Amino acid sequence: MNPAHDFARPKTSYRKLYAFQKAEAIYDLTYFFLQNHIAKSDRTYDQMLQAARSGKQNIVEGRSDAASSAEMEIKLYGVARGSLHELLNDYLDFMRTRNITIWEPKHPRSAKLRETCKNNNDTNYFIRLAQKLNDEELTNLIVTLIYQCIAMSGKMIDLVKSDFLTKGGVREQMTRARLSARNNKQ
């Protein structure tokens, strides 16, 4: 196929994105956390669950819309990142108000936790792990995953911007394809 005609093609599945896999683990861990720590009648319960869902679902939607609009893809990844920031703040509030130690980068367990989160993307792995953790370990695990997913969302936005600057938008690609097809007929 002529490379000029290679436009508006779906990108790889969102399920293959590490950011999605982390966001799915964050959602599942948040559900697990809420079941055990926040009353369903508490407004925070719904807020946290919806923020976790939004972080995941906007990655899905952004990837799905990627074939037709870099602008929409960037916007949706940005929404996902914003939702993850909101969720992060809820966890940090929970930890602060209950005097749970937040593992700063110099904490003796922080480096190993960051490495564990970096090297694992399977939600089932994290749920099995969560069942063995105390509140301090669990909340620091989730916070670490959120920080990593926020960083990944930012990198995805940067990649979309770079791709746009290199290839242009769908309209530009369509125009190039049409001109190429027209020139090949002559």
Image (cartoon, rainbow, N blue to C red):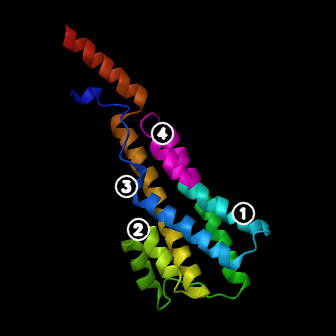
Say whether residue 99 is left or right of residue 75. right
Q: Which mark is residue 46?
A: 1
Label 3 is placed on what type of residue? Answer: Lys
Residue drawn at x 58%, y 88% is 134
Mark closer to the chain start, 4 or 3:
3
Spatial CA span between label 4 and label 3:
16 Å
Between residue 68 and residue 182, name the one nearer to us: 68
Camera-near label (4 vs 2) is 2
- Mark 3 highlights which residue? 16
Q: Of helix, strand and loop, which one carries label 3?
A: helix
Residue drawn at x 54%, y 86% is 133
Mark closer to the chain start, 1 or 4:
1
Quarter holding the C terminus? top left
Q: What residue span does the magenta drawing correspond to?
A: 57-81
Mark closer to the chain start, 1 or 2:
1
Asked if the residue under mark 2 is in contact with the one under mark 1, i.e. CB atoms within 8 Å, the reply is no
Spatial CA span between label 3 and label 2:
10 Å
Q: How many marks?
A: 4
How far from the left and from the top, in percent, is residue 70? 46, 39
